[in-house]
């Protein structure tokens, strides 16, 4: 059985795509903090506590919007 497409024209997904791009930027910032030699353990923990849930949320949104 063929899966029905959930895709809509780009205009209707533009808000979701903007959110995905925002996630990319925030995730990138978290990674930068995690890689910084001068970042404190507290800064790295705070960054990681943001990174993990955002990555999960982001992966779901990207999968639903771009690949299904």
Image (spheres, helix red, strand yellow):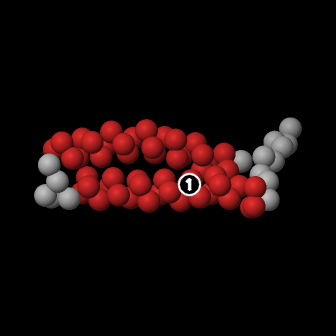
- Which quadrant of the structure image shows residue 49? top left
> Can residue 66 be seen here?
no
Relative placement, left or right, of 43 versus 54 is left
> Height in image: 3 above or below 18?
above
The quadrant of the rendering that contains the N terminus is top right
**Between 14 and 61, which is closer to the camera in this rendering?**
14
* Residue 27 pos. (x, y %): 41, 53
> Can residue 15 be seen here?
yes
* Residue 34 pos. (x, y %): 25, 52
Q: Residue furthest right?
A: 1
The residue identified by callout 1 is 20
Relative placement, left or right, of 28 versus 46 is right
Relative placement, left or right, of 55 versus 32 is right
- Which quadrant of the structure image shows residue 4? top right
| Residue at 56 percent of width and 54 percent of height | 20
Relative placement, left or right, of 48 versus 38 is right
| Residue at 62 percent of width and 57 percent of height | 17
* Residue 5 pos. (x, y %): 81, 48
* Residue 56 pos. (x, y %): 49, 40
> Height in image: 55 above or below 15?
above
**Between 68 and 7, which is closer to the camera in this rendering?**
7
Q: Residue furthest front?
A: 15
In terms of secondary structure, where does tag 1 sit?
Answer: helix
Please count the marks in the image: 1
| Residue at 27 percent of width and 42 percent of height | 46
**Residue count near mark 1 (Cα–Cα under 10 Å), binned few <14, some 14–19, many ≥20:** some
């Amino acid at each position: 059985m063929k899966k029905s497409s959930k895709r809509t024209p780009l205009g209707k997904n533009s808000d979701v795509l903007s959110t995905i791009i925002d996630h990319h930027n925030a995730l990138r910032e978290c990674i930068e903090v995690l890689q910084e030699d001068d970042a404190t353990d507290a800064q790295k923990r705070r960054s990681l506590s943001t990174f993990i849930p955002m990555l999960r949320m982001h992966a779901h949104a990207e999968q639903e919007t771009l690949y299904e």
